Image (spheres, grey):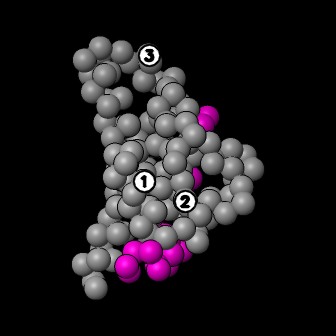
Amino acid sequence: MIAQSVAVAELMTTRVLFAKPEQDFQEIARLFGELHIHHLPVTDENGKLVGIISANDIMKAYSRWRAADDQLSRLSLKVADLMTSSPYYVCPSSSIQKAAELFTLHGIQSLPVVEGNKVVGIITSRDLVRYFAEL
């Protein structure tokens, strides 16, 4: 099967932006909008993966504030307050089949790619769809 023989490293994006847990939510929300991104790995000061934040996380936060009209909470909210801690991830040598299985099993759309203790890329469900569409 093709998906078993193709490594994540062949499809992953290597130019990855990162968020930090202590970053201001408003700053990250603006970045998502300006750059049209959907997921950001969250790393500590050593580059170790500690979480992931998605556009869905941001939209959920905004809808909660709108309902509550809680301006003070919005001003002090940090990435750590919204991110998914200890996210699923893959290694560059993992097969794209493994990535697809994780997407399906856990209902997620992106996976940080980790080598050693460092995030070296990200792969998304869009990357897989694009790959199979080009076959």
Instruction: Name the residue tied to disc 1.
Output: 102
Q: Provide residue 84's location: percent of width, then percent of height.
A: 49, 37
Mark toward the start of the polypeptide (3 vs 1): 3
Sequence-wise, which precedes: disc 2 or disc 3? 3
Pointer 1 or 2: first along the chain: 2
Q: Position of residue 135 (x, y in %)?
A: 28, 85
Q: Secondary structure at mark 2?
A: loop
Mark 2 to mark 3: distance in Å?
37 Å
Q: Is residue 16 magenta?
A: yes
Mark 3 and mark 1: Cα distance apart in space: 37 Å
- Which dot marks residue 90? 2
Left/right of residue 117 with respect to residue 55 in the rendered view: right
Q: Which residues are magenta?
A: 1-23
Q: What residue is at 58 percent from the left and 72 percent from the top?
A: 93
Mark 1 closeness class: few <14, some 14–19, many ≥20 residues within 10 Å: some
In contact (CB < 8 Å): disc 1 and disc 2: yes
Q: Secondary structure at mark 1?
A: helix
**Magenta-drawn stretch, dominant element (helix, strand or loop):** loop
Side (left or right) of 24 relative to 110: right
> Quarter holding the N terminus?
bottom left
Pointer 3 residue:
72
